[in-house]
Image (cartoon, rainbow, N blue to C red):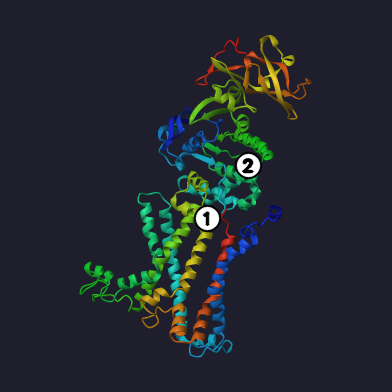
Amino acid sequence: MASASAALNPHRYLMDDRRFVGVIFLVPALLYILLLVGLPFLLAIAFGFSDVTVGNTELNFIGFDNFVAVWENDIFRQVFGNTVMFTLVSQIFILIFANILAIIFTQEFTGKWFARFIFILPWATPVSLAAIGWLWMFDTKYSPIDYLLLQTGFLGPKGILSNSRNLYWLANPVLSQISVIFVQVWRMTPLATVILMAGLSSIPTDILDQAEVDGSRFMRTLLQVKLPLILPIMVIALLFSMITMFGDMTVVYVLTRGGPVDYTRIIGLYSFQIGIEGGNLAQGAAMALFAFPLLLALALLMLRTASRAEVR
Amino acid sequence: MSLVELQGIKKFFDDVRAVDGIELEIENGEFLVILGPSGCGKTTLMRMIAGLEKPTAGQIFIGGENVTALPPRKRGVSMVFQSYALYPHMNVFNNIAFPLKAQSREKKYDKRAIRDKVENTARLLEIDMLLDRRPRQLSGGQRQRVAIARAMVTQPAVLLLDEPLSNLDAKLRANARDELKEFQRSSNITAVFVTHDQIEAMGLGDRIVVMSHGKIQQIGTPQLIYDDPANEFVATFLGSPSMNILRSDAFSFGFRPETFLPKTLADNPENSRIFHYYVKRVEYLGSDRLLYGYVHGHDNELTLAKVPSNVRVSLDVDCDYEFAVHNSDIKFFDKRSGQRIEQQNLQGVV
């Protein structure tokens, strides 16, 4: 009897049941998305349309008042501008460096393995640790960069850049912005490089051989064959690093806390400072949501470009 | 002097001798086919002519000039790859124009000249109405024409073709073969065509180079190679089904299944060798009957016979018949080296 029923029932064990196994496999990802992404996102929307604060957790719907207030806030406008500027400028440099590095790392040379390893490190380092490292590099008094500039005569009493012994990287408005962009480019170039390398190595060798037989030299092959072919992948790399960068606050939090004045304050940081540190949850949420339509539009646009471009 | 000369060409990949000492001359206007099983080194040999691989040893001359160390663009060669390797992001016009643009500095092509050349070549290959299309909008046959147009537009000294027909379906392939041959003859270009398909090789080649294990086994016209194979490899590689090989103590001998016929059909029985043939199985192939069986005295060596269907001789399974092969159709091979040897006395062997 037992063997007869086993033969009739294809799901002898629980793990043979496709539906059960499917659910088991999906649950962790679903839980992660629902609890750690979906719920906070819905909460942010609820908070953004309410007057909730850390002191008074009662949710009262007040319409678009928070958004209007945020937009009329001059500091927020500068913060918004900073965020867009930092993101765009760093993306340009990331794309340039990632392309150059990807091309170098897809060539054959001795020590390639080691060079690749070194270049991947910034990405593998935790953001906060890396930022603290750079905090020391940009130190007001003991900056190693300043020390080198001093030794080479760029700084000091007769210095070319300044007659002071220090540049005060994180205290000078322009230099602080440059520093923040530099650190972002430094830590995000490796990921973009890896993505582009995958793209470059996915180009069929026949196509590259054909270009060579057709008489194409390095630059023509690069500009007219390789880059157009990895364009969709470049778009993906760009999308990744833009979204990461837009939402990041660690680097500025560690380096400058938004200063001097508001020169390096960005949306993620300001929203944290107003909402969590300042206790005005509703306004903090409204600020964070300001970036949302922009990012959504960006993501949709890029994904569409990526799917429309032809790889093969 | 020949248009292309290969002298002692070798190519080793680490320990693998992909190409192992090739001497070859290719004449101007010739359609030369390099035929061999996969892994025999034929594609590597072609890539060395193109300049995509550097030979480990040996020299390559094109038009009398030693091009061994020159990059592809200085060799006056062009190539059609098996995958056609069309640039997917360019339309047909730009695909064909690409080599012209790439060489425009050396050859002084202006925009106008490029347009004229592309349009003329496209017209020649009857793809002039496709110039605005992208490769993915083309059929397999059209892609192949675009690839050939791109290879021809610079008027190369040598056109290299790496199995360009193998991506076409069987029906299209026969047609494409005919067109390719016609096109080569009318344009009088020198073509080197690599394939593993003996029918393509026989149909296209003015001469065939049969390769195996990185070495040339035989060079000659299709007929010479088929009728007069230099060794056992060439004998069995060409022909479908392949040549029957039977072994005796002193040597091997072989004959093609289509020359192995019932004795009653032999034109010339007194100059033929008679075999006792046991038929194990019969396949009816429409135009032919293919017999599987054994020759008396060679019970472990499957021997095939291909008898035209229109010959009204009944041939039944599990029966013994007398079959004949004309003496001149029997080839003898050295048992150790596989090389052809002169006529032997078969007396006592069968």
Question: In the image, what residue type sits under mark 1?
Answer: Leu
Taking depth in this image into account, of A144 and B81 the one nearest to the observer is A144
Q: Where is residue A165? Give x, y as percent.
A: 23, 75
Residue lying at 41% horizontally and 58% vertically, measured from the top left: A101
Question: In the image, what residue type sits under mark 2?
Answer: Leu
Along the horizontal axis of the image, is A53 left or right of A10?
left
In what element is the residue under mark 2? Answer: helix
Q: Residues within 10 Å of mark 1 (few under 14, many from 20)?
A: many
User: Which mark is nearer the camera, 1 or 2?
Assistant: 1
- Rendered view: B69 above or below B216: below
Parent chain of label 1:
A
In what element is the residue under mark 1? Answer: helix
Taking depth in this image into account, of B334 and A183 the one nearest to the observer is B334
- Rendered view: A311 above or below B189: below
Along the horizontal axis of the image, is A178 left or right of A158?
right
Residue lying at 45% horizontally and 67% vertically, measured from the top left: A91
- Rendered view: B64 above or below A12: above
Q: Where is residue B248? Give x, y as percent.
A: 57, 16
Q: Which residue is mark 1?
A: A229
Along the horizontal axis of the image, is B288 left or right of B71?
right
Q: Where is residue B160? Give x, y as percent.
A: 53, 37
Residue lying at 67% horizontally and 40% vertically, measured from the top left: B172
Marks 1 & 2 on one chain: no
Outermost residue to the front: A1
Q: Residues within 10 Å of mark 2 (few under 14, many from 20)?
A: some
| Numbered badge on residue B221 | none
Query: In which quadrant of the rendered view does residue B204 lie?
Result: top right
Q: Is residue B67 visible?
A: no
Q: Which residue is mark 2?
A: B124
